[in-house]
Image (cartoon, rainbow, N blue to C red):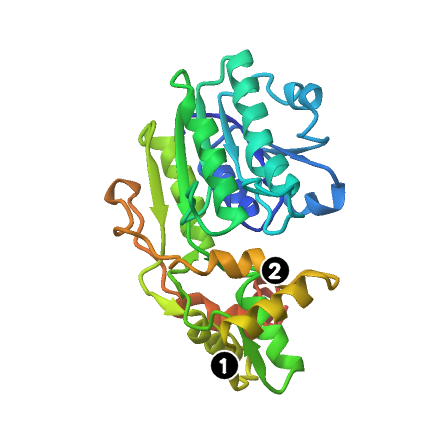
Amino acid sequence: MAYNNILIIGGSGFIGSQVVAQLARSGASRVTVPTRRYESSKHLLVMPTVRTVITDVHDETALDGLFEGVDAVVNLVGILQSRRGPAGSAYGPDFARAHVALPQKIVAACLRHGVQRLVHISALGADAEAPSMYLRSKAAGEAVVLADHALATTVLRPSVVFGEQDHFLNMFAALQKYFPVLPLGSAGARFQPVYVGDVAQAVVTLLQAHIGFGKTYELAGPQIYTLAQLVQLAGSYAGHARPIIALPPLLATLQAFCLEHLPGQLMSRDNLASMQIDNVAAAPLAAELGIVPTALEQVAPRYLAGINSQQQLDAYRRNAHR
């Protein structure tokens, strides 16, 4: 392991938990995961080299306190929804705080503490001229972390990420459990989903192999699907596939407007805007990352059918009469 004391900001979430687990297995002597709530990170404590710290990373003083002895930082913080900003603003205040201001604080802390390695997770399609606030704010965050050449920074741009406990396929599977039909906006939008374990492996490889300084890598799986195809697969694998009704643009916008004002915000107009451009990689996964992309069909049928790792363990015990 090239870097042994690693700070994972956003490490208690879906992707972060996989990154932390793979780093712990690969020999990192200490992995620190800041979190605002103990409950959201206690699943990481079974790993002996992982420690969690209850703190607010948006507070610069608190952030500084995490950097003692750190030799590499991974930033995984990202949100999907934001309030809208004033007229003419490129993105709303919540995106500005999470995707732009926090990376600025992380870069400044790295420079103050002499930390030279930063891996920053962005999003496929990030562009200052993108149609959505989300993608524009992600592009602004990339510009922040790549601006200072004193840092050895790598940006990863994953497509939509799938895996056990994802919020994408699981959501569509759950909706089809309760509704007889599924009205769907942007049904023809194209995605190239990437497995969460492959994203985590990319982070580990970058930290182990001393590669990718100043580079941006797109992370995508081996297959391209339309949104309708992904929704159909989610329903089929979960055992309750429903008919899909592709909505015209006006009705799709109306649906998104209604959903963004309901608890849980399953969809927003900004999410719909993101789907105006294909979420597809421009090139195959970079060979130097050494990853063979995992097909969605290899893993999604298992977890969407409700067969999680604990259920598998219970089955093994039963078969062994334990």
User: What residue type is disc 1 on?
Assistant: Ser
Q: Which part of the image, by quadrant, shows the C terminus?
A: bottom right
Query: Disc 2, disc 1: CB below 8 Å?
Result: no
Residue 180, above or below 311: below
Say which of 233 and 79 sits in front: 79
Say which of 206 and 252 sits in front: 252
Whichever of callouts 2 and 1 sits on the residue coming sooner in the sequence is 1
Locate residue 152 relative to residue 240 in the image: left or right: left
Q: Which disc number belongs to residue 236? A: 1
**For the residue labelled by badge 2, is the local secondary structure a helix, a strand or a loop?**
loop
- Whole-percent x, y for residue 7 in the image: 56, 29
State the count of labels: 2
Q: Which residue is drawn at 28% across and 45% down?
A: 290
- Whole-percent x, y for residue 87 in the image: 61, 43
The answer to whether residue 317 shows anywhere in this view is no
User: What residue type is disc 2 on?
Assistant: Ser
Q: Which part of the image, by quadrant, shows the N terminus?
A: top left
How many neighbours does mark 2 have within 10 angstroms: few (below 14), some (14-19), or many (20 or more)?
many
Q: Residue at x 27, y 45 (%)?
A: 286
Q: Which residue is drawn at 55% across and 25% down?
A: 104
Say which of 286 and 31 sits in front: 286
Locate residue 289 relative to residue 255 in the image: left or right: left
Locate residue 198 relative to residue 260 in the image: left or right: left
The answer for how far apart the CA atoms under marks 2 and 1 are is 25 Å
Residue 111, above or below 294: above
Residue 20 placement: quadrant: top right
- Whole-percent x, y for residue 165 in the image: 58, 60
How many neighbours does mark 1 have within 10 angstroms: few (below 14), some (14-19), or many (20 or more)?
some
- Whole-percent x, y for residue 162 in the image: 48, 60
Q: Which disc number belongs to residue 271? A: none
Q: What residue would you read off at disc 2?
A: 268
Say which of 175 and 37 sits in front: 175
